[in-house]
Image (cartoon, helix red, strand yellow):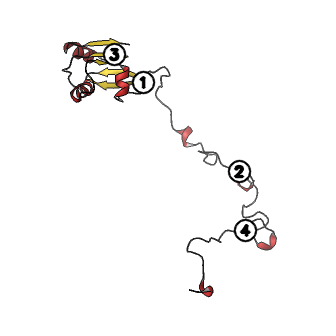
Amino acid sequence: MDLSNLKPAAGSVKNNSKRVGRGQGSGKGGTATRGHKGAKSRSGYSKKIGFEGGQMPLQRRVPKFGFKNINRKEYQGINLDTLQKLVDDGKITDTVDLDVILATRLAGKNDLVKILGRGELKAKLKVSAHKFTATAKAAIEAAGGEAVTL
């Protein structure tokens, strides 16, 4: 290698950009390859998201359906088999309240908690939550525990 055969690394130099709008002599003057008139020839042009050239956009062609209840309350569900597993692992002993649920990461601090009835519960627990399903409440009480609605 010597000074006569030095060249930049492959891909480091790009010089294929057209210098537009630099006078008639360049061949790319005048309209600067933007064509004549119309929104796309103007500076500051940007097409709106979803714009389909004046055709009715898909977003507006497709029918809307259904109903979103703005007052819906979203509950974080916790099943009985999950509680039983925590008892078996020794993570909970006799009471299950929001602090315990938070500590075991079953729900977030702003979540509403609902106890669901999947699985079976053998341990005697005092469970505090925002809601219980009928089967969950029956199972907790059948095991000798207590279901406290917050």
Q: Nearer the viewer, mark 2 or mark 1?
A: 1
User: In the image, residue 10 lies at what x, y percent?
Assistant: 55, 74
Q: Nearer the viewer, mark 4 or mark 2?
A: 4
Q: Are marks 3 and 1 in contact (CB under 8 Å)?
A: no
Measured in 3D between alpha carbons, the distance from the residue under mark 4 to the one under mark 2, in whole angstroms, is 20 Å
Q: Secondary structure at mark 2?
A: loop
Q: Secondary structure at mark 1?
A: loop
Measured in 3D between alpha carbons, the distance from the residue under mark 3 to the one under mark 4, in whole angstroms, is 72 Å
Relative horizontal placement of residue 128, taking residue 31 as reference (left or right): left
Q: Residues within 10 Å of mark 1 (few under 14, many from 20)?
A: some
Residue position marked by numbered label 2 in the rendering = 45
At 56% from the left and 75% from the top, the residue drawn is 9
Q: Of the residues shown, which amino acid type is indicated by label 3?
A: Ser
Q: Of the residues shown, which amino acid type is indicated by label 1?
A: Asp
Task: Using the image, tell me which numbered label, if any, was put on residue 128.
Answer: 3
> Is the N terminus in the top left, top right, bottom left or bottom right quadrant?
bottom right
Q: Are marks 2 and 1 in contact (CB under 8 Å)?
A: no
